[in-house]
Image (cartoon, helix red, strand yellow):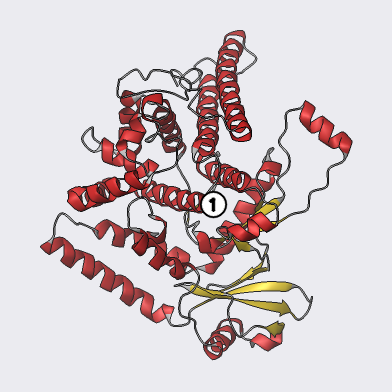
Amino acid sequence: MASAMTYLLPYEWTSTFIPLQDQCPVSSYESIERMFRDDIGEGLKDYFSEFAEEPIGAASLAQVHLATVKETGQKVAVKVQHPGLAVWAPLDLALTKFTFSTLKRFFPEYDLEWLSSEMEVSLPQELDFQQEAANAIRTQRYFAQLPNREQLPLVVPDVLWARQRILVMANESGHRLDDLPYLDAEGIDRDEVSAALARIFNEMIFGRDAPLHCDPHGGNIAIRRRETAETSHARLLRRLLWRRKQPNFEIILYDHGLYRDIPETLRRSYAKMWLAVIDGDMRAMQRYAHEVAGISEEEFPLFASAITGRDFVSVLNPASKANQSKSLLTPRTSEEKKEMGDALQEGLLSDLVQMLGRVPRVILLILKTNDLTRSLDESLHTRRGPARGFLILARYCARTVFREQVDSIRERPGGGSLLRPDNAARLLVAWFGYLRVEVKLEAFELWLALKRVFGIGGAGVEFGAGGGGGGGRGAVLRQGVKGA
């Protein structure tokens, strides 16, 4: 995670951690052969006609080898746990707990015991590859049934079989997401990749009963070109229906060991909090930050910076014409990065550590996912900056609130049939409110596209010029989700 914290840590630190994503020390072929025989009862050559002795990637818990199944000839990726982990993992965990406990004793302002507690829960799950296989299968099935799956070009490798320390999956290969020369050479639009990433992970966070992948760093995501054939009639129909062109790439997601489920009540409050952030409604931000994570008014500025990865001034000005250099819709400047780094060195780091120790564990993992996807997005160096990502986020948040309104209509005393005249009227009001938000977001996205094509400067359209006031001027998003 440290490699993704580019908004907090210096480049020299974050760049040093990048090799830990997929270039850790490897276990020997002989030790893997012994473990395979111990766990399966067969040797590698009994099951595979080919098995590459050198792994294609190695992380802290496991490494991946390419192989060919002897019986079918299928090319597969074999993920094997480092054999020594069964012995060393409990010792490492105990040492981590001791280290953080000692640190707290001498430096109480740097209480990191919450981190060792989270590791105590997460590590056994990540070490069970049968659980990882179940997570991968669940994610495949979830995205396969979505009506907008064509705009979510996600590939999760098929699982062939799994044991606790061995996982065999279909070989789905690609390039690192930050391989910009590859993207440009293949005609893959970086802005579309950024948008696809935003849709995939917002679906995981805001989709009902969706599984959340909590470790999407650069070593766990790959991209490859996909050929898309479209007839002239299909193109005409798509344009008449205002549908987006199918992406010419696929995003491959690996390592499904660390997953969480977000409770529905938390998901709804989290969506409302983001709508308030984007709309600049300070009172609503503070209210939902308290509902989501128990954040006090004093802690809110720091929490707002943590969830957005931006200076608090940017949070106060989501699209302010008066301060375009610090807006959520503009890329971070070197000045903003320096100011955030200086603030941490001046004492905010201990405040951040203490605050994170008090928030619910699932919020920590959501923040981690946000950090990692934000880092991936910044590595793409898109033309539109973060604006489109916030538009996509707003859409998913508005959809979540609309679904809550529909559920509340169904749960009304005396019967929740949507065919009842009073319920149908409420549903119609909620639907038109949601549609109004969608139209405004679509118009803003069109404006961003026109700005890019014609080189138009300036803000032009406000997305929600809230400022620090309670009401939040420009309430673009609150319309239609009011009273939810």
Compared with 328, 89 (above or below) is below
Nearest the eye: 4 or 109: 4
- Crowding at mark 1 (Cα within 10 Å: few <14, some 14-19, many 20+): some
- Quadrant housing the C terminus: top left
- Circle 1 sits on which residue? 380
Considering the numbered disc 1 on the image, is that residue within a helix, a strand or a loop? helix
Compared with 452, 174 (above or below) is below
Compared with 267, 403 (above or below) is above
Name the spot of residue 437 as percent of width and height, x first. 55, 22
Nearest the eye: 33 or 247: 247
Q: Is residue 155 left or right of residue 135?
A: right
Q: Is residue 330 left or right of residue 295?
A: right
Quadrant for residue 230, please give it: top right
Does residue 155 appear in this view? no
The residue lying at 38 percent from left, 55 percent from top is 5
Q: Is residue 134 left or right of residue 83?
A: right
Does residue 233 appear in this view? yes
The residue lying at 58 percent from left, 33 percent from top is 455
The residue lying furthest to the left in this view is 106
Quadrant for residue 117, please give it: bottom left
Query: How many dots with numbers?
Result: 1
Name the spot of residue 257 as percent of width and height, x first. 50, 62
Name the spot of residue 357 as percent of width and height, x first. 26, 51
- Quadrant housing the N terminus: bottom left
Q: Is residue 21 left or right of residue 423?
A: left
The residue lying at 34 percent from left, 48 percent from top is 337
